[in-house]
Image: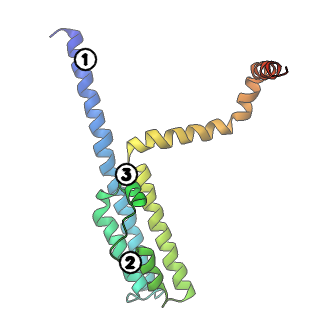
Amino acid sequence: MNPQGFTALASLASIGMLAVLLFRLYRHLALEQFRQKIFALRDELFDCALDGQIAFTAPAYGLLRQTMNGMIRFGHRANLLFAAMLGITAIEPRQPSFRARMQQAKRSLSGEQRQLVDEFQRRMNFLTIEFLVLGSPLVMATVIGPFLFALEARRHASRLLRLFRRPMDRIDTEAFLTTEG
């Protein structure tokens, strides 16, 4: 094998290993981090029940805790494509939705307890969305990257416009003159 062939082969092997690292190991790391955050949130919910802020026997507590357990156990199934498919399918669930169950479960709670449950549910949902978006290197490259670029470009738009003021003035003048009749 000549030196160029060896270099090409070594480069391909390196790119392959980087792809495995990026797409497999990163996803695994993101999943473990997601599970740890949900576990910590569930632990915090348990502490609130231990402090008497909500009863362990409250249906809303049980529903929220069971949902967090499901997130921990089945987080590996969650991805942005799966979430999108759930969002666009018109199939009606055979059982009441989580929202309907939670509304029913919160009826027996006081106002403070409802706020507590709502806050834990909001945080759980935020962690899930964070995982769906940041858990995929492909999504980060194709969605987050351009989004951050657009934000940064917008932040510096006035500077860019000043830089291109003269050429833009000439373009605007030419466009105006061509339609003047």
Give the amino acid at mark 1. Ala
Percent x, y of residue 52: 46, 88
Mark 3 highlights which residue? 81
- Return the mark for residue 96: 2
- From the image, state whether disc 1 or disc 2 is nearer to you: 2
Disc 2 + disc 3, Cβ < 8 Å: no
Percent x, y of residue 68: 36, 71
Mark 1 highlights which residue? 8
Quadrant in the picture for the C terminus: top right
Sooner in the amino-acid sequence: mark 2 or mark 3? 3
Is 173 situated left or right of 145 in this image? right
Which residue occupies the extreme front position in the image?
Answer: 181
Distance Cα–Cα, label 1 vs label 3:
35 Å
Percent x, y of residue 147: 55, 42
In the picture, residue 33 is in which quadrant? bottom left
- Label 1: how many Cα within 10 Å (few below 14, some 14–19, many 20+): few
Quadrant in the picture for the N terminus: top left
Disc 1 + disc 2, Cβ < 8 Å: no
Distance Cα–Cα, label 2 vs label 3:
23 Å
Sooner in the amino-acid sequence: mark 1 or mark 2? 1
